[in-house]
Amino acid sequence: MDQRQENYKEVITDWIYNLKYILSVYLNNKNVPSDHPIYILGHRIDIDQFEIEDRINKIKQLVQETIWITYRRNYPPLYQSNYISDTGWGCMLRVGQMAMAQMLKKHLKNHGDKRDEDYDNIILAFADNDSQENKEFIEFQNSKDKQKAHNFICPFSIQKIAYLAKKEFNLDPGEWYRPNYILFLLELLHNTIPIRASENLKLSVFNDSCLFLDQLMNRMFEAKFETDKDLEEQLEKTQLIGKNSLAIFVLTRIGLDEPNQKYLKILDEIMELPYFQGIVGGTPKRAFYILGKINDHYLYLDPHYVQEAENKDQINENKMFNRTSYSCKNIHLLNQKHVDTSMGLSFYIRNQSELLQFWRNMKQIKQSSDDFFIFLSDSAPEYVDYSGQLEESSNKLNDDDVVFLQ
């Protein structure tokens, strides 16, 4: 299908979303808690309670350093559709992309070349306009020879995600993405066509509020561990050398119609861990990428802002614009009592010592509370296979009441 431009109804819809975003920014920046530590993406920041401006500036700095991915318009029509924008329906997709970008940023900072080039390569990986590369990707997916090496620059583009969503879930462009859908698709894309220097980052999505140590160890060491042995003791052995780092997503619930107050306290403890890398979640009507917390408020990035799409050549040519286009200068805060109960918790584990400490931290939180909502086990039951199982989610996350007009 040939490229087309937005019609007037689509332009008006974009304008409404951007107006609502601006109003949200104005209201949020007037409510920054002043006397509590900040926990954001595995870091704790203590700032004197009287230095309010310093506190706000530090939050803004941390937010700006996180890759921000939003609605985009005027890219080539998505697979088997007339959609040239994800305005009004793609917020969960964009939140998933942000969570994936953060994992890559964290990993390349530890293992990559530690140059600006790594940052640029991450942004390129999420370029929306990759029509020619997407054709090659579809051919690759339909090929019987999956062993042949392919160098895809934009593995997490909305073009590829839309194609796989149709193939895996019969999900058409314009339909809502559940957290399990987008995380599964990102796992599939990363484990099939990772970007340069991220080949030793293994992504695993755990469903049903479960987390199994043997599966984490299998991914890190690329070896099968016997379930009748003490896995923690094996992790402590110096002769074990982990081949990979881990990006972990745990799909869970913290209540039914509204958050359970006891679960929120446990979630606070989880968000204070140094391995925490955000939440794929939001409110019952809108998806947000939650970065951290200040007291009883959550810091988040909002994808509900419409920007112009760029192809990978434009991104390469306009790197300074890129860093503006993918960097949010605004603070968004959400009272925890308004958070949606369905979410995906994310963690980055660099090596075996971090995996051991992460597991012990999680067990310690569990032992200190009878209300721990994640099931921890050294070994997964034989009938559990997360590589190919996605249970239907009852989560309520969708977009707000502005309908996307085609």
Image (tube, grey):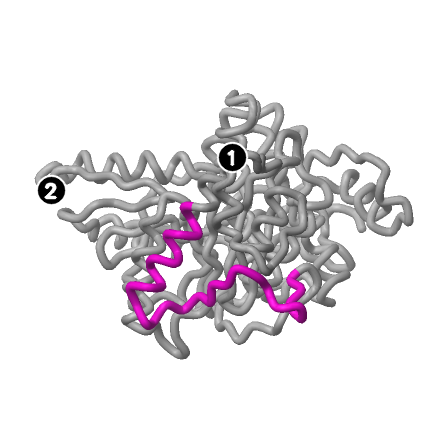
| Quadrant assignment, res 370 | bottom left
| Label 2 residue SS | loop
- Tell whether 180 sits left or right of 188: left
Q: Residue at x 40, y 34 (%)?
A: 65
Report the Cα–Cα distance between label 1 and label 2. Answer: 44 Å
- Tell whether 55 sits left or right of 222: left
Quick one: 125 or 261, which is closer to the camera?
Answer: 261
Give the residue at mark 1.
238
| Quadrant assignment, res 79 | bottom right
Farthest residue toward the bottom? Answer: 257
Quick one: 1 or 347, which is closer to the camera?
Answer: 347
The picture places residue 349, in percent across and down from the top left corner, at 49, 43
Asked if residue 364 is among those painted magenta in the image, a careful observer would answer: yes
- Tell whether 151 sits left or right of 53: right
| Label 1 residue SS | loop
Q: Amino acid at mark 2?
A: Gln
Quick one: 184 or 382, which is closer to the camera?
Answer: 382
Mark 2: few, some, or many residues within 10 Å (few <14, many ≥20)?
few
